[in-house]
Amino acid sequence: MYSRVCAVLLRSASLAILASAVSFGAANERQQAQAQVLDHADLLCANCFFGPSYYYYCFEAGDKVLIGYQRTPVINWRDESKNYLTKVHRGWTMWMPPGQSIPLSYDDKHIWVARPDGKQVKLIQDYSRDLFTSSDRCRQAVKVKDR
């Protein structure tokens, strides 16, 4: 009797662990789109020693406006436009849109764009900062928290 109860408990626990792993590990489906670059903005770290710079991008993909940022570690001195870490780690180079129209993929939390060498850059979606000056569509997509 004792071994039967243990077997049932062990089986139940195994199924519960498997179910939780499947539900937490479920990947969001990426959607592919040809997007238009509407605007970009930079929050640069000046005189930094491994401080982050943030590069924000705003895209129009069909009827959606997507806003995402790239966080890049920086070492610079007196010139905030430089990042001496890019000589050591090319992945910390700021992504530059190759043109006005680019292919991208996105889900609920991220946007993926390609660098010129073909590697993917993952941008984190964030609609909380009103940084854009050139596009009213980008400014309208920002969800500013009420104070």
Image: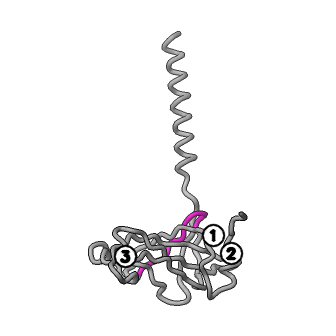
Q: Residues within 10 Å of mark 1 (few under 14, many from 20)?
A: some
Q: Is residue 65 above or below residue 38?
A: above
User: Which residue is depicted at the point 59% across and 68% down?
Assistant: 126
Q: Secondary structure at mark 2?
A: helix
At label 1, which amino acid type do we have? Tyr
Give the mark, 3 or 2, whose residue is nearer the N terminus: 3
User: Which residue is depicted at the point 51% across and 11% down?
Assistant: 2
Give the mark, 3 or 1, whose residue is nearer the N terminus: 3
* Membership of 67 in magenta stretch: no
Q: Which residue is mark 2?
A: 141
Q: Which mark is residue 47?
A: 3
The spot of residue 55 in percent (x, y) is 49, 76
Q: Residues within 10 Å of mark 2 (few under 14, many from 20)?
A: some
Check whether the beta carbons of the residues at disc 3 and disc 1 lie within 8 A of each other: no
Question: For this rendering, which residue is in front, 78 or 142?
Answer: 78
* Quadrant of the rendering where the C terminus is positioned: bottom right
Q: Is residue 6 above or below residue 33?
A: above
Q: Which residue is mark 1?
A: 127
Q: Secondary structure at mark 3?
A: loop
Q: Is residue 61 above or below residue 143?
A: below
At label 2, which amino acid type do we have? Ala
User: Which residue is depicted at the point 60% across and 85% down?
Assistant: 38
Q: Residues within 10 Å of mark 3 (few under 14, many from 20)?
A: some
Q: Secondary structure at mark 1?
A: loop
At label 3, which amino acid type do we have? Asn
Range covered by the magenta-colored residues: 107-115
